[in-house]
Amino acid sequence: MRGLMKYLAWRDERGITDLETAIVLIAFVVVSSVFAFAALSTGLFSSDKSKETIWAELAEAQGTLELRGDVKVEATLTSKSLTTVTAEAVGTGNGVQIAFTLASSPILSKAETVYLAGVAKTRDTDYTINFDADAIAFTSAPANSSAVTADYKYVHDFVSTAATTMTAFTLNNSPIIPGSGLTVYSDGVAKTLGSDYGVNYDTGVVTYTSAPGNGVRVDATYTSYVLRR
Amino acid sequence: MTGGTTFVSYMDPDTLANDITNYTLGKLGSADADNLLEISEIFEIKVDVSTYSLTNDDEFTINITPVSGAVLTIGRSTLAQINTRMSLR
């Protein structure tokens, strides 16, 4: 009985020895450090690559020019306006000459008065006038040393002569600045924008609501522009 | 060192002018006499647009392309009323 109890009381202390523990520990540390190194170097490599890519792109995208201040534009305005001339001394009659020329052109059609020695003459009876050439031709030569004077208006854009059913006329310059003194005349009589005619400012086309009629001269005053820079 | 020139191009809905030669270069302020734009120099570029039929409320774009680096794009639209001198921001 005593022998048995001694046997039962003996504890078994066999287990993992110190050396085996150390070997397992070392192996564990080595493997984990290898894994850590692999993970770190992959991360470093990819961040290095992206840094290189960003620097390369910056060289292309970097702006070397910069706009200072604002952008300015200049326009050249051409103004066709109406000037009234009063009592212009056209010439002096000498009993022979019948043709006289007015100083400015083109003249606003049928808005002129020609005086011979201070007396107003009638168009087509006492004289004829060529509006394109600004030439007056008297039916009979003015008497010697009689003064020929004229009142007239001249406008810088004669548009055209209307044909029978023509309603659209194109101004010689476009585009036009709206509200810049645009006035259209038929045979010297000013027409009203909106009721007598309409205008396209970009193309310079004037459209009459009803055709002016054959032979009516259309003149206009306005301001047009060209953008220069 | 290789050289190169900066070229200017103009574009609007109706026209594309790729290499404008009729622009003038003005040197402002303390810029020296050469055509190289150095740091802190200001050049003024004047582009002649009279052949491109610009009217009011038109959009246009001017691209200035240097030899290296980004293209400077200037896109503006003209004002509703045309005067002799206008500032397009």
Image (cartoon, helix red, strand yellow):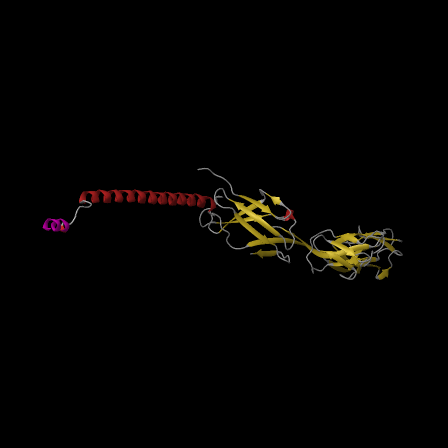
Kindly indicate the quadrant of the structure image that contains residue B56. Answer: bottom right
Percent coordinates x, y for residue B3 in the rendering: 47, 38
Considering every residue shown, the one lying at the far left of the view is: A2
State the residue in front, A72 or A108. Answer: A72
Q: Is residue A142 left or right of residue B65?
A: right
In this orientation, does residue A189 appear? yes
At a point 55% along the width and 50% down the height, the residue shown is B74
State the residue in front, B75 or A141. Answer: B75
Question: How many numbered discs?
Answer: 0
Q: Is residue B75 left or right of residue A13?
A: right
Question: Is residue A36 magenta-colored?
Answer: no
Considering every residue shown, the one lying at the far top of the view is: B2
Give the answer, above or below, for where A102 lies relative to A20: below
Percent coordinates x, y for residue A168 in the rendering: 78, 53
The kind of secondary structure the magenta stretch mainly shows is helix
Magenta range is A1-8
Percent coordinates x, y for residue A105 in the rendering: 76, 53
State the residue in front, B9 or B30. Answer: B9
Question: Is residue A4 magenta-colored?
Answer: yes
Considering every residue shown, the one lying at the far front of the view is: A1
In this orientation, does residue A79 appear? no
Kindly indicate the quadrant of the structure image that contains residue A118. Answer: bottom right
Q: Is residue A18 left or right of residue A173?
A: left
Percent coordinates x, y for residue A109 in the rendering: 81, 56
